[in-house]
Structure formats: structure tokens, C-alpha cells
Amino acid sequence: MSIPFDQIQIEPAYRKVAAAIGGRILNRSLREGDRLPPEMELARQFGVNRSTVREALRELESNGLVTRRPGSKLMSVSRPQHLAIAEAVTRGLVLHDVTFMEVWEALTLLEPPIAEVAARARTADDLSQVAAAAGQFAADNVLTVTAVHRVAEFFRTVGRATHNQVLVLAQEPLLQLLEPSLGVMIDKVPQARSRIMTAQRKISEALHERDTDGARTWMARHIRDFRKGFEIAGIDLGHRITGS
């Protein structure tokens, strides 16, 4: 019995050029702000056409690894912005048909530890931002779309108070998916807004007191309340989240 082999995939030259430049960026041989040589010089060094280099740079730019500064003809090394990274992950999750339940379960696992770390690591400035976010949500007559954005922003301020970039990056795609989820529920449950305000106040107080257990406990309650809200509103947690 013969075993079939897959065809060898021949990678386009521009991908090889992009991988070579990207490898230098990732191993820090090229640092943020460093300028790349002109396209013609890169083409000479790689032994390819200028159009191949241009396509490689276009791919690197789309991934946030290089950018063209205003007034400059040369590409410079850059770092992908947190929001751009998160948006790419969010789009991928939507295309994989994630559900309200999956987002809720992920928030259950991630947000309480984030609150605990924030209670330990927060600064006075962090407390001010958390309090401001809670105060904005508590404002009267806030439209639904504004309210759900402010809920997500409260989570973001708590996340930033950890001073841990990995946690902030892990959190952001879930918050982007949380907003449409809350938008479906928040006005169908009369007590939703008041319960959110209570949880935000308690979490803020725990952060102020550096009460790690209290911060974790109240954040866990806060996330559990979202599921209760969906159940009260009669919303199927198996419903897929769609992009905005």
C-alpha cells in the first residue's frame, strides 16, 4: 500500500523577504524607530525585484511591524498597537462563531484574577481612572450603546491597573465581544444597571483598600450577574456573536 504525499508548497518570494525582515525585528536586531534601507537597496541585497520588496513591506506594514513616517520615503520599524492586535483577534473569534456562553466563560476565568492583581499593583492614578469610569456609567439617561461601552471601559481601567501588558492584551478581545453581548441584554433586565453600578463601586473600593480577596470576589459576582441577566431576559447563551 503506497502512502500519498502532500504537494510541496512553494512560498512566494515576497513572503520570504517579509519573513527575513520580520525575523530581524522580532529578534531585536532592528529596533523600533530604525529605518530600513530604500526599496532598491533591499532588492539588491535580497536579489529580487523591487516589486517583490514593495509587496513584502506592504505585508509587514499590514501586520504593524513597519510604518512610513510623515515626510519620509523610508519605512521605519514599529510595534503593533494593542488595539490593532485585539481587533484582529476579535475578528478571528467572530469568524469562528463564538457564542455569548464562550465569552462569559472566558471572562469568568480572566477577570477575577485581573481584579486581584490590580488591587495589588494599582497606583493613585489608576484609582482615579477606575473611579472616573464607574462615575461615567452611573450618569443618568445614558443610551444603551454608551452604557455598554462604559461597562467595557471600566474593565479596561481595572486591567490597566495591573500594569501587565499580557493581561491587558488578553482582556481586550473579550471586552470587544462583551459590548454587543451586553447590548442585547442590558435594557431587558430592569435591575441590570443598578447591579452593575453596585459591582463597580465595590470593586473600586476593594482596589482602593488593596483588598485582593474582595476585588476578586466582587469581580466574580459581577461576571456571574451577566449570565443571570441573559437568563432573565430569555436570551440563548448559545447565540453566536456577530461583528458590528
Image: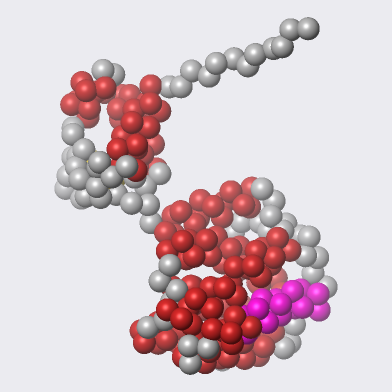
The front one of 212 and 197 is 212
In the image, 55: left or right of 188? Answer: left
Q: Residue at x 61, y 56 (%)?
A: 243
The quarter holding residue 18 reads: top left
Q: Please, is residue 145 above or below residue 81 in the view?
A: below
Q: In which quarter of the image is the C terminus?
A: bottom right
Q: Please, is residue 156 above or below residue 214 in the view?
A: above
Place of residue 189 in the rendered image (x, y in percent of width and height, measured from the top left): 75, 82
Prevailing secondary structure class for the magenta stretch in the rendered image: helix
Q: In which quarter of the image is the N terminus?
A: top right
Tell me which segment is drawn in magenta.
218-232
Q: Which residue is drawn at 40% across and 44% down?
A: 63
Place of residue 93 in the rendered image (x, y in percent of width and height, measured from the top left): 62, 52
Q: Residue at x 53, y 65 (%)?
A: 171
Q: Please, is residue 163 above or below residue 222 in the view?
A: above
Q: Which residue is drawn at 65% across and 90% down?
A: 194
In the image, 241: left or right of 56? Answer: right
